Image: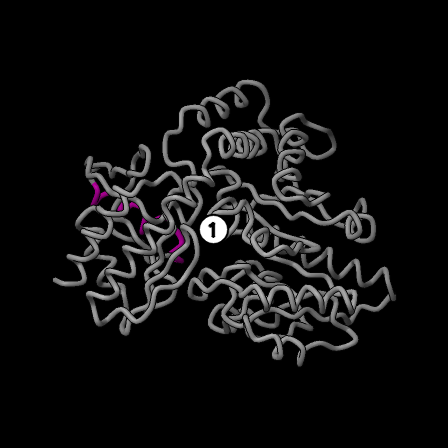
Amino acid sequence: MDMKEYIEEAESALLHTYNRYQIVLDRGEGVHLYDIEGKEYLDFCAGIAVFALGYHNREYNDALKSQIDKLIHTSNYYYNVPAIEAAKSLKKASGMDRVFFTNSGAEAVEGAVKAARKYAYLKDGRTDHEIIAMNHSFHGRTMGALAVTGNPKYREAFEPLIGNIRFADLNDFESVERQVTDRTCAIILETVQGEGGMVPAAEEFLKSVRALCDERDILLILDEIQCGMGRTGYMFAWQKYGIKPDIMTTAKALGCGVPIGAFLMTEKVGQNSLVAGDHGTTYGGNPLACAAAQKVLELFEKNRIIENVREVAPYLEKRLEELKDRHGCIVERRGTGLMQGLKFDRPVGEYISRALEKGLILINAGADIIRFVPPLIITKDDVNRMIDILDGCIGS
């Protein structure tokens, strides 16, 4: 079948919950993707911040092939070596103490919320505890993750969701303080808001929230699903600020394409929250997914991925600032590391479509922001090519 026929078949078979771009992707190599007709695309999306190592990394592929030939799934009634090794490596990378592997980021958020509520329940036996989340946040599409997502358009059609959620504003500590009650058990936020506009949490704000949580025995949950795994120049974005969450979530680049997520916690929370029977998953932590995560963590260190981010990210920021200065329609550059955004004074859909026609894959973050979350192996030459293409798209 040709491209048009594949798309028609997809539209007749798949539930229409995505407005997909009209290409059918076939394979990848490095920072490039190719459609079924062989057209090459420079990828500054990375599967929405997933493919950190780039496409067709031979060591990663070989690790998966080797595990497929050994064992793919057993269930969590038994131990398996890849899960043990991946948990050990993830603990080392994060400095956290306990790991629960999930299938996705949304499931990691669900587990984090359950752990926080169980922690509070064991303290006082109450079931009316509250969680403070941030406006403009995004934590996932499942019912619990939606409940703490601070964008009404995602929530309204599916209400009532889980209750006792209050919302404050990122980087406005007073707004957080106003929402705290004697029933507050957790504060959840993205260390860098992704869908909400590529907005990093300010250091002073994070430290103030951490101090508040310490003072009131409130758990701090940091969502690192998009901003974690090296994207900001630190393995996890919060590590830059000298603070530590009680619970954190990760996914996306943790598996570099294989579906896996995790929520992690300190020993204090681990010993005083979820116990056998409280939480579970059939596929979470299976040997194949954990072999992927273990290899990703190994290659991050071996290939000096974070060092590359720290070298290339300032150059990307500089080139984006130059682009902003050339075009009056660009209002602001936002972000940190290789998680950047350009805010426009108009919808950006047309620019993204033009870029796709010229062989550049970009995505938005809201109607007026172009998001840049490329593979973490990009070079300055890749940045230059992206800027050249986008420059032409904006100017045309």
The percent coordinates of residue 84 (x first, y second) are: 68, 30
119 and 329: which is toward the camera: 329
* Residue at the (53%, 64%) spot, across then down: 201
Predominant secondary structure in magenta?
helix
Q: Which residue is mark 1?
A: 232
* Residue at the (67%, 44%) spot, across then down: 95
The single residue placed furthest to the left in the displayed view is 396
Q: Is residue 368 above or below residue 65?
A: below
Q: In the rendered image, is residue 8 in sight?
A: no
Quadrant containing the N terminus is: top left
- Find the magenta span and give its range: 3-17
260 and 181: which is toward the camera: 181
Q: In the rendered image, is residue 294 in sight?
A: yes
The percent coordinates of residue 146 (x first, y second) are: 56, 64
For the residue marked with disc 1, what is the amino acid?
A: Thr
Quadrant containing the C terminus is: bottom left
For label 1, count other residues whose C-alpha is less than 10 Å away and answer few (under 14), some (14-19) or many (20+).
many
Q: Tell me which colouring the rendered structure shows.
A: one colour
The percent coordinates of residue 301 (x first, y second) are: 52, 32
Mark 1: secondary structure: loop
Q: Is residue 158 left or right of residue 381?
A: right
Confirm whether the magenta stretch covers residue 280: no
Q: Is residue 331 above or below residue 116?
A: below
The percent coordinates of residue 55 (x first, y second) are: 36, 34
Q: Quadrant of residue 43?
A: top left
Q: Is residue 180 left or right of residue 223?
A: right
48 and 20: which is toward the camera: 48
